[in-house]
């Protein structure tokens, strides 16, 4: 059974595929993993993997960790070995993505702002960062 992509109301006529998870409100899913240069980002992918309403990863990122001939496979298997040695739930690509790739978000502390921003991968979330974060702050704590 093949589902056709829904391009009728896509922005700028772009091809896209909706998340197939029942009840998912994401009209245009965006891949948060960005694990490979072939990542679909906010474009078309053959399948979206659903973690939550705002968290999806594309088939290209899934394949990057799932296929033994891809560079990400070793990263996944090393994580899987550590994950199972700690007696946690069953290791899967979905669990790996949730544990290792979901980005952190922090809220701007300026009273007139309050926007939520995704942290770059070089930033560690700390209580201090949460208490003093302002939009545009870098990993070194400097506002650009």
Image (tube, helix red, strand yellow):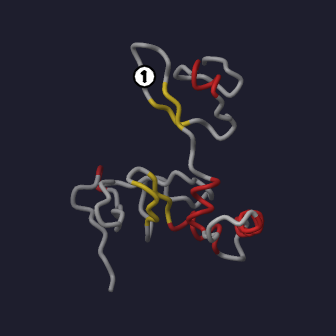
Q: Nearer the viewer, residue 42 or 103?
A: 103
Residue 54 in the figure: left or right of residue 63: left
Where does the image place residue 23, in percent across and percent down from the top left? 28, 61
**Residue furthest bottom as drawn:** 1
Residue 17 in the figure: left or right of residue 48: left
Residue 107 in the figure: left or right of residue 62: left
Where residue 3 sits, quadrant-wise, is bottom left
Residue at 61% x, 52% y is: 101
Residue at 50% x, 18% y is: 109
Where does the image place residue 113, in percent across and percent down from the top left? 41, 18
Residue 34 in the figure: left or right of residue 4: right
**Residue furthest front as drawn:** 87
Where does the image place residue 97, in percent across and percent down from the top left? 59, 59
Can you say which quadrant of the picture contains the C terminus? Answer: top right
Query: What residue sits right under mark 1 in the picture?
Result: 114
Vertical comparison of 27 with 19: above or below = above
Where does the image place residue 140, in percent across and percent down from the top left? 71, 23
């Amino acid at each position: 059974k093949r589902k056709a992509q829904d391009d009728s109301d896509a922005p700028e006529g772009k091809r896209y595929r909706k998340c197939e998870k029942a009840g998912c409100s994401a009209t245009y899913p965006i891949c948060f993993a960005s694990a490979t240069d072939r990542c679909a980002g906010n474009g078309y992918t053959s399948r979206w993997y659903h973690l939550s309403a705002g968290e999806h990863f594309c088939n290209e990122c899934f394949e990057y960790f799932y296929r033994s001939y891809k560079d990400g496979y070793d990263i996944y298997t090393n994580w899987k070995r550590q994950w199972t040695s700690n007696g946690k739930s069953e290791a899967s690509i979905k669990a790996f993505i949730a544990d290792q790739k979901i980005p952190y978000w922090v809220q701007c502390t300026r009273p007139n702002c309050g926007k939520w921003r995704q942290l770059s991968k070089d930033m560690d979330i700390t209580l201090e960062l949460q208490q003093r974060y302002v939009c545009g702050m870098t990993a070194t704590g400097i506002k650009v």
